[in-house]
Amino acid sequence: MALVYGVEKKTVPTHMKFVMGGASGMLATCIVQPLDLLKTRMQISGTLGTREYKNSFEVLSKIWKNEGMLSLYNGLSAGLLRQASYTSAKMGVYQMELDWYRKNFGNYPSMVASMTMGIVAGAFGALCGNPAEVALIRMMSDNRLMPEDRRNYKNVGDAFVRIVKDEGVVALWRGCLPTVGRAMVVNMVQLASYSLMKDQLHGYLSEGIPLHLTAALVSGLLTSVTSMPLDMAKTRIQQMKVIDGKPEYSGTIDVLKRVVKNEGAFAVWKGFTPYLIRMGPHTIFSFVFLEQMNKAYGKHVLGDSLSDSVP
């Protein structure tokens, strides 16, 4: 409960904000999953020694021709679990930080405070979501391998069981450092740039979908450029194989050094187009779904159509 102009106002419970945050991310993932798969295939296309794809359109064409349309949703179960863990944890922690800031300072957080809270929330969410991320990367990249090298996971549950059995529990957090680093950069840049763009564009666009779309696209561009190299390293580490106890890469820096040396400096942004196209729509869909869930909860559960909107 909260008091607004002396009237007691019902609010959405914090735990339901966590649930709705994860659910909105899962719904958005159902829409943009094919773009995530294209991005992943582009990022690992140089690991076999030859350049498999010239651009994202060639990836899409070959997948459609050789694997079928439904293969664009390979790894969807892992992607949904990632949203259920990563997004729920991220938004839950961010909400707790926001409530703490408002309680102690009595107003909305500044740009620097928002960036700091985004970094902390992103790191915590990445730690929780890394196991699903490992399974997701492997499931999306499996069909490009030779038949004898494929892992052939049936679903995300099967992936977890086999990874733990064959490689140990620690393997579920393989690539955790670049995953956390990427999440920190993404949330810091995304939250700050999105808020700034909305403020700057308010004089030209009224509150609504056009404003959200424009701000999200600019935010997605800035976030994609800054986080793409870490995303490349994360992807390569998570799908690598360990032969005779020796991993293919020793860490993030090793991945980036070898990619630049063997494939060129711009290769660290390989898969940029689908990554950028995915980033904007996923942000937009996530917030649209979240707004609608908040309104529905307020109307049908709290009986208050003016209940909480997205903070």
Image: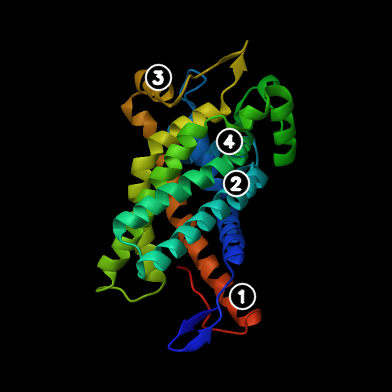
* Residue behind mark 1: 297
- Residue type, label 2: Arg
What is the CA distance from the residue labelled 4 to the residue labelled 3? 20 Å
Q: Earlier in the sequence, mark 2 or mark 1?
A: 2
Q: Is residue 75 above or below residue 141?
A: below
What is the CA distance from the residue labelled 4 to the residue labelled 1? 34 Å
Please name whichever residue, 66 or 233, is drawn nearer the observer in this view of the structure.
233
Q: Secondary structure at mark 2?
A: helix
Mark 4 vs mark 2, foreground winner is 2
Estimate the x, y position of residue 164 in percent, counting from the top left.
71, 29
Estimate the x, y position of residue 289 in percent, counting from the top left.
55, 66
Q: Earlier in the sequence, mark 4 or mark 3?
A: 4
Other residues around mark 4 within 10 Å, as few (<14) / some (14–19) / many (≥20): many
In screen coordinates, is 219 left or right of 238?
left
In screen coordinates, is 9 left or right of 156?
left
Please name whichever residue, 29 or 179, is drawn nearer the observer in this view of the structure.
179
Cβ–Cβ under 8 Å for marks 2 and 1: no
- Rendered-image quadrant of the C terminus: bottom left
What is the CA distance from the residue labelled 2 to the residue labelled 1? 24 Å
Other residues around mark 2 within 10 Å, as few (<14) / some (14–19) / many (≥20): many
- Rendered-image quadrant of the N terminus: bottom right
In the picture, residue 23 is in which quadrant?
A: bottom right
* Residue behind mark 3: 258
- Residue type, label 3: Arg
Q: Residue furthest top?
A: 244
Cβ–Cβ under 8 Å for marks 4 and 2: no
Mark 4 vs mark 1, foreground winner is 1
* Residue behind mark 2: 82
